């Protein structure tokens, strides 16, 4: 069992602070990508909208989330001890699981997998953002 990613917020305040702090980074990333794509000023102004920058911020936030990766037995042991809801995507007939827990939100998400741990971690992060964080961080 191991963990990928570095961010496990311990409260909504911590999650919100990190999300807000990523705004300037998202703007810089989008600007530099647009530069690399050789956007003219007019094209940049037309195509790089607030929604584009917000999408970059969401992706940056999600990519930092910590995800535990282990075998099904390790996950089952963890799940038995976790006192909150766990939403699992995937098949019960595979050997490995990636999961992200958010105890202060009383939930966790997980994705099962057989051979593609990177894809499972990415799926878990997207699920975590969309099912746990999006509503509280984006709809302010």
Image (cartoon, rainbow, N blue to C red):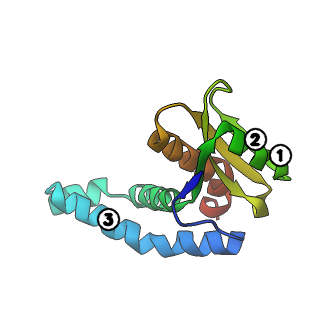
In this picture, residue 53 sits left or right of residue 87: left
- CA neighbours of label 2 inside 10 A, class few (<14), some (14 to 19), many (20+): few
The earlier-in-sequence mark between 3 and 2 is 3
Circle 3 — which element?
Answer: helix
User: What residue sits 72% from the left and 71% below the top?
Assistant: 11
- How far apart marks 3 and 2 lie (CA) works out to 39 Å
Quadrant of the frame with the C terminus: bottom right
Residue 80: assigned label:
1
Tags 1 and 2 touching, CB below 8 Å: yes
User: Disc 2 designates what residue?
Assistant: 76
Whether residue 80 is situated above or below residue 24 in the rendered picture: above
Where does the image place residue 35, in percent across and percent down from the top left? 18, 62
Which residue: 77% across, 45% down?
77
Q: Residue at x 65, y 68 (%)?
A: 9
Q: Label 1: few (<14), some or many (≥20) within 10 Å? A: few
Q: Position of residue 43 (x, y in %)?
A: 21, 55
Q: Label 1's element? A: helix
Is residue 9 at all visible to an observer of this figure? Answer: yes
Q: Tag 2's secondary structure?
A: helix
Q: Is residue 44 left or right of residue 104?
A: left
Determine the residue positioned at 52% across, 46% down: 121
């Amino acid at each position: 069992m191991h963990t990928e990613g570095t961010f496990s917020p311990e409260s909504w305040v911590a999650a919100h602070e990190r999300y807000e702090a990523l705004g300037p980074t998202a703007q810089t990333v989008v600007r530099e990508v647009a530069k690399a794509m050789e956007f003219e000023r007019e094209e940049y102004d037309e195509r790089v909208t607030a929604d584009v920058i917000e999408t970059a911020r969401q992706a940056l936030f999600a990519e930092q989330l910590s995800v535990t990766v282990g075998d099904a037995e390790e996950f089952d042991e963890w799940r038995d001890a976790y006192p909150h809801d766990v939403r699992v995507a995937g098949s019960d007939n595979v050997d490995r699981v990636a999961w992200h827990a958010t105890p202060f939100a009383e939930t966790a998400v997980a994705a099962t997998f057989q051979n593609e741990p990177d894809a499972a971690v990415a799926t878990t992060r997207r699920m975590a953002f969309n099912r746990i964080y999006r509503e509280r961080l984006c709809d302010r």
